[in-house]
Amino acid sequence: MTTSGHNKIMKQVRIAELKSRLSEYLRAVRGGETISVLDRETPVARIVPVRGRLALRIQKPAPGAPPLNRVPLPAPARLKVDVVKLLLEERQGYR
């Protein structure tokens, strides 16, 4: 099964078919396709190709750029909420 979305076509496959033809689907993913895995009609996973070395790259500053310790920082945000309290509440939700 194939669906099309915003400028891209994505194959959809049910779990049983994926299990029986796994090698074929992995070849398609290796070729650049993305595959959505369905449990009956519900999408449960997406198999996407591994992109080659998209890790962080560090570049030297452009000639004439100011040194990093001279780059002005933005003004602090003036918030009416306690950010630390929000962070602690969020962390409590994961326990």
Image: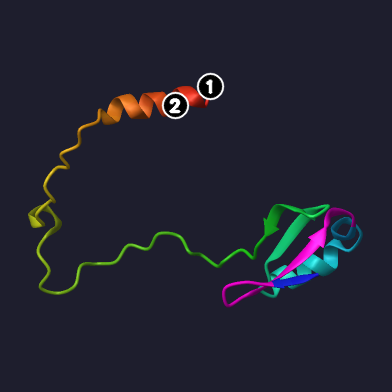
The kind of residue tagged 1 is: Arg
At horizontal 84% and vertical 65% (from top left) the residue drawn is 23
Indicate yes or no whether the magenta region holds residue 45: no
**Range drawn in magenta:** 4-16
At horizontal 44% and vertical 26% (from top left) the residue drawn is 91
Quarter of the image for residue 85 reads: top left
The kind of residue tagged 2 is: Arg
Secondary structure, mark 2, is helix
Q: Which residue lies furthest to the bottom in this view?
A: 7
Could you say which disc has been placed on residue 95 in the image? 1
Indicate yes or no whether the magenta region holds residue 11: yes
Residue 14 at x, y = what percent?
A: 83, 58
Residue 50 at x, y = what percent?
A: 61, 63
Quarter the N terminus occupies: bottom right
At horizontal 55% and vertical 67% (from top left) the residue drawn is 52
Count of marks placed on residues:
2
Classify residue 69 as left or right of residue 34. left
Quarter of the image for residue 49 reads: bottom right
